[in-house]
Amino acid sequence: MRISNQGNWGDAPLGLEGLALRFAQAISHTGLNQSEFARTLGISAGFVSDVVRGQKKPGAEFLYAVRTTFGISVDWLLTGEGNLTGNSGIDLDLLRTVRLQIAVARSAIIDANPTAKALLLLIRDGRLQEAAAEPDIRAFLDLVAPTDPDAELAIELYNGQLWTTDAGAQRRNLLAAAMAHFEARKPIDKVAALARSSGSTIQINISPSQRNAGRDYHEG
């Protein structure tokens, strides 16, 4: 399972093709520049530069030193699987599937819902696609599907902080990310927003004449 929690680096290709990009991110994660990183490991800055540019591949001793010195996951460096520090993230898609299956099972067993019972049989036999387009089934799934956007946000934020082991930094980053999430979704005064973008006066063309709308416009 690939967990892409590395900011702008999440699109690095899997496998050795993306090694140079992931290695550059690993250096950035340490807070050191390439020369400082190399000096800490006791290797030449030129070799580090060559790895970042994709001109050389690191050997076992080098990777071992990166892992033991900085806690960078060797598996992640070489393959792109997992995350930078090797901690396990949460597969949000899998979690959604599990929660939906729980909802269907509850409806079938506790509520004795016939549609839910039919769905359980289709899922068990691997034939769900046969009935996926049925309006009744889609309507039922829309009805029972668990919706908890705050829980999904919590998982996304959790996955996004696996790269750091600094508890204080994690708390600050999580709070900032949560605030930014809700600030972006906060209702806005659209008229005020337009006024800010255009200045104190908005020119509105009303054929055949033209009027000014804004704080200095008064209807006669």
Image (cartoon, rainbow, N blue to C red):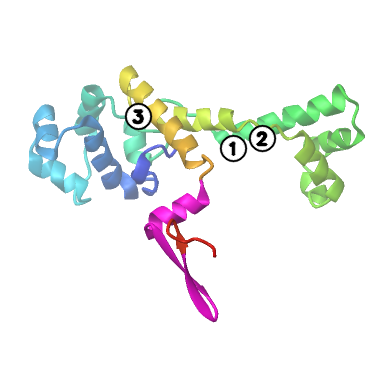
Examine the image and state in which quarter residue 84 appears.
top left
> What's under tag 3, amino acid-wise?
Trp
Kindly state the secondary structure of the residue where label 1 is placed.
Answer: helix
Q: Mark 1 or mark 3, which is nearer the start of the sequence?
A: 1
x, y (%) of residue 120?
Answer: 82, 34
State which region is magenta. Answer: 189-212
Question: Label 3 vs label 2: CA separation?
Answer: 26 Å
Disc nearer the start of the sequence (3/2): 2
Tell me the tag on residue 163: 3
Label 2 is placed on what type of residue? Thr
> For the view shown, which residue lies furthest in the bottom direction?
208
CA neighbours of label 1 inside 10 A, class few (<14), some (14 to 19), many (20+): few
Apparent side of residue 150 relative to residue 24 in the rendered image (left or right): right
Q: What residue sits right under mark 2 in the picture? A: 97
Instruction: Name the residue rendered at 36%, 35% in the picture.
Output: 76
Could you tell me if the residues under marks 2 and 1 are in contact, i.e. CB atoms within 8 Å? yes
Between the C-alphas of marks 2 and 1, the distance is 6 Å
Say whether residue 159 is visible: no
Membership of 136 in magenta stretch: no
Graded by Cα atoms within 10 Å as few (under 14), some (14 to 19) or many (20 or more), the crowding at tag 3 reads: some
Relative to 15, 30 lies left or right: left
How far apart are labels 3 and 1 at the CA level?
21 Å
User: Amino acid under label 1?
Assistant: Asp
Is residue 176 among the parts visible in the rendering?
yes
Residue 39 image point, x, y percent: 8, 31
Residue for point 14% across, 33% down: 37
Judging depth in this view, the residue of 76 and 147 nearest the camera is 147
What numbered label is drawn on residue 93? Answer: 1
Q: Residue at point 38% right, 40% down?
A: 80
> Element type at marker 2?
helix
Closer to us: 153 or 42: 153
